[in-house]
Amino acid sequence: MAGGTKRLPRAVREQQMLDAAVEVFARNGYHATSMDAIAAEADISKPMLYLYYGSKEELFAACIHREGVRFVEAVSPAGNPNLTPREQVRTALFSFLDFVDKNRQSWMVLYRQAMTEQAFTGQVQSSREMLINLVAKLLESSTKNPDPTWNFSVMAVALIGAGEAVADRIAGGEIAVGEAADLLENLAWRGLRASGPVRD
Amino acid sequence: MAGGTKRLPRAVREQQMLDAAVEVFARNGYHATSMDAIAAEADISKPMLYLYYGSKEELFAACIHREGVRFVEAVSPAGNPNLTPREQVRTALFSFLDFVDKNRQSWMVLYRQAMTEQAFTGQVQSSREMLINLVAKLLESSTKNPDPTWNFSVMAVALIGAGEAVADRIAGGEIAVGEAADLLENLAWRGLRASGPVRD
Amino acid sequence: MAGGTKRLPRAVREQQMLDAAVEVFARNGYHATSMDAIAAEADISKPMLYLYYGSKEELFAACIHREGVRFVEAVSPAGNPNLTPREQVRTALFSFLDFVDKNRQSWMVLYRQAMTEQAFTGQVQSSREMLINLVAKLLESSTKNPDPTWNFSVMAVALIGAGEAVADRIAGGEIAVGEAADLLENLAWRGLRASGPVRD
Amino acid sequence: MAGGTKRLPRAVREQQMLDAAVEVFARNGYHATSMDAIAAEADISKPMLYLYYGSKEELFAACIHREGVRFVEAVSPAGNPNLTPREQVRTALFSFLDFVDKNRQSWMVLYRQAMTEQAFTGQVQSSREMLINLVAKLLESSTKNPDPTWNFSVMAVALIGAGEAVADRIAGGEIAVGEAADLLENLAWRGLRASGPVRD
DNA sequence: AATGAATGAGTTTTCATTCAT
DNA sequence: TATGAATGAAAACTCATTCAT
């Protein structure tokens, strides 16, 4: 009853729907979310959802697309070529974690849901792959005399895995962005020596 | 029809069922897996599943329990106190990644599925939390003059996140165990310097 | 296919469904009635039943509620205070038996089914208890110098039991309303002497 | 595990099974009772039930048969021709209500369950019909100058209905046998005048 | 005589999806 | 544009019943 029967321009409706969908998907997961629940959250009728997005799958795809774009927009400005690699890493790390902190639902949907749902891993994985390659390149370019046996790609996987794990804790409100960024930066640059000599 | 209609002793059937369940859950995820599909895979009738495990939820719980035990059994022997911390880490890393490599479905079920399913995160998260604390302790004890601002717990989260990400690639057959173990060990001990001086 | 595929307003469909449900419940009993059978009888799809009534239990509850209301509406006008007690009893008896005669399915559902189904005895028993108390009061108030050892409540139970048994025969088409009403009235007022001196 | 694997003579086993079946049927009703539950209660395996009784329906039939015989055996001695009709009624009433009081489960199964279950009403109804005819005869024979319009059969239905309703309360432990028998006897012989003149 | 093991057939319930207005 | 009404298809779960030992 709340929303009435307003005629809204397409663009507005689209956002309203995506907002609702992201909200509910983030809360309950893809499978446990029904179109009914999304329609209710958006305060519109179910046929509207189908009119605009065709199917649950497409709606979810639209969600991860929008949130993915937001994510990229938030993180990409970090690649400022005037900075040293370490500064670049630091900036990127911070904007990444900050985005997660401020857009917990985005993170949930993109990471927790999309990554797990067979039908969508592809979409997310490919973006992720790009990011990994990017980081791998960055690592390689910032390393003098690279050891030929050294696999930068795997290293990038590990670093990003570390980042995601930490991001997950941030999304859960368990740790703070600044602390996490420092720590990850140190881990990358110095390993566990960060806190003092490690006994070997 | 494939498997015939033998009368099997309870213990055997239990394993046969769990094998099938793990297989299908790993392939399709918890929600997308129907009891029918599991019964078909195990070449038995659905009521047997219910007779032995009571419900889909309990069946899945039995899966993660069995795989969890396997996992712990495979990894725990690593804690040999005669080794240096670094050797301990190296051994643990290797047995972890080796287990994942040889039990890809276990990893899928335990990590990808159980972690995502609202109803089961608890079970897995608590084990994970224990592991994280363990690693945090290990880090702390192996560090001289620990920086009081240093948060070993977050560091453990990051390292384990890195490990999980790498394990995921191993489960996907994309990278090799030995290489991955070296790399993670180095990351932990030396950061990115591993491959040579990093320009700052 | 028989009934066409019209879009009916909610209120109409509700009644159509209840009609079908009462029909089938009365015929087969609660347990032996499947939602499929009711849907078929109502010439609609099963999901509609769930959309409107939520569950088989709630659907049955809705049935006994509607029939209960009908019953009360049919019987309650009898309580006209201008009549003598005996006239009141006579009127009430007649409207009760007449209702049963004209709404056999209602009686079946309310009495035979609802009374027997563990989950619903409560609902019906409490109405019945009220009726019994009402009758007990009526008996007490219409009796001069009541014997203090006399248990009006048990008497009410007996009389209502007699009424129900007779109603059951009426619902079965075995006896006629007028005759039954006379007889019960006499039984209440005069016992078996009704037909002449009883040898002791 | 409790019962072990004793070899019992057929007759004993049969009773053991019927005891269990009556117990569970009385508690949960026919439909809500599973063969599993009965087997468990009897502490035997399900195939035994089928070996002895063929099907759930036949098992239930055996229950109502045995309980019906018990019932008749308990009540029939009442028909002592040396007694006056009123004494006969009094004796019969008492033995009936006493039986119900001491065999609540029998009553539950015979009256509440069997009467409601489509497939069994026949069996019980025919016994009931015989009883009704018996009472009708008794009424007729004990009445001088019977009013030709007087329907003794309906009167018998009413009286037995009253008796059943009261018996139900006795089975529920709500009222005592003696009181109930007195009351029903008075109701039959004197109507509500039992407690003093009724205002007309 | 007795049972552990096994299942076919059915039940309630849910959900993505589509008409008719 | 917008929706109330409606459903096909499938999922989880149960139960009476039987077979092989």
Image: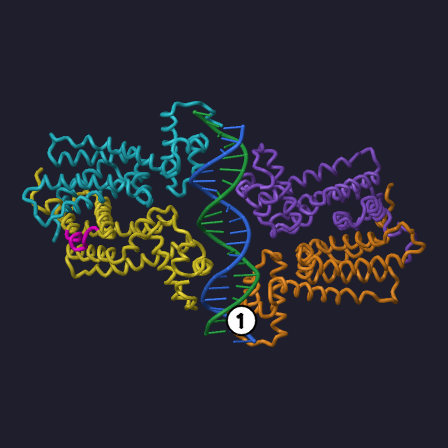
Chain colours: A cyan, B yellow, C purple, D orange, E blue, F green
Report the residue at 71% width, 60% height from top. D123
**Picture quarter containing residue B193?**
top left
Q: Which residue is mark 1?
A: D3
Judged from this view, the residue extending furthest toward the right is: D145
Callout 1: chain: D
Image quadrant of residue B178? bottom left
Residue sitting nearer the eye, B168 or D180: B168
Percent coordinates x, y for residue C177 in the rendering: 80, 44
Crowd tier of the residue under label 1, counting other residues whose Cα lies within 10 Å: few below 14, some 14–19, many 20 or above? few
Task: Give the image quarter of residue D80.
Answer: bottom right
Viewer-side residue, D40 vs C178: C178
**Residue C155 shows in this picture:** no
Q: Which residue does the image show at 38% across and 46% down from the upper left?
A: B118
Q: Main secondary structure of the magenta part?
A: helix
Quadrant location of the C terminus of chain D in the rendered image: top right
Mark 1: amino acid: Gly
Q: Is residue D88 magenta?
A: no
Q: Position of residue D183 (x, y in %)?
A: 80, 53
Judge left or right: residue A179 versus residue A199: right
Determine whether the residue tagged by mark 1 lies in a helix, strand or loop: loop
Q: Nearer the viewer, residue B173 or A32?
A: B173
Q: Which residue is at a point 43% across and 54% down the rendered structure image? A: B36
Locate residue B49 relative to residue D180 in the image: left or right: left
Residue E8: image location, x then y, percent: 50, 60
| Residue D143 makes an appearance in the image | yes
Question: Does C142 appear above or below B171?
Answer: above
Q: Bounds of the magenta span?
A: B174-182
- Is D79 left, or right, of F10 in this rendering? right
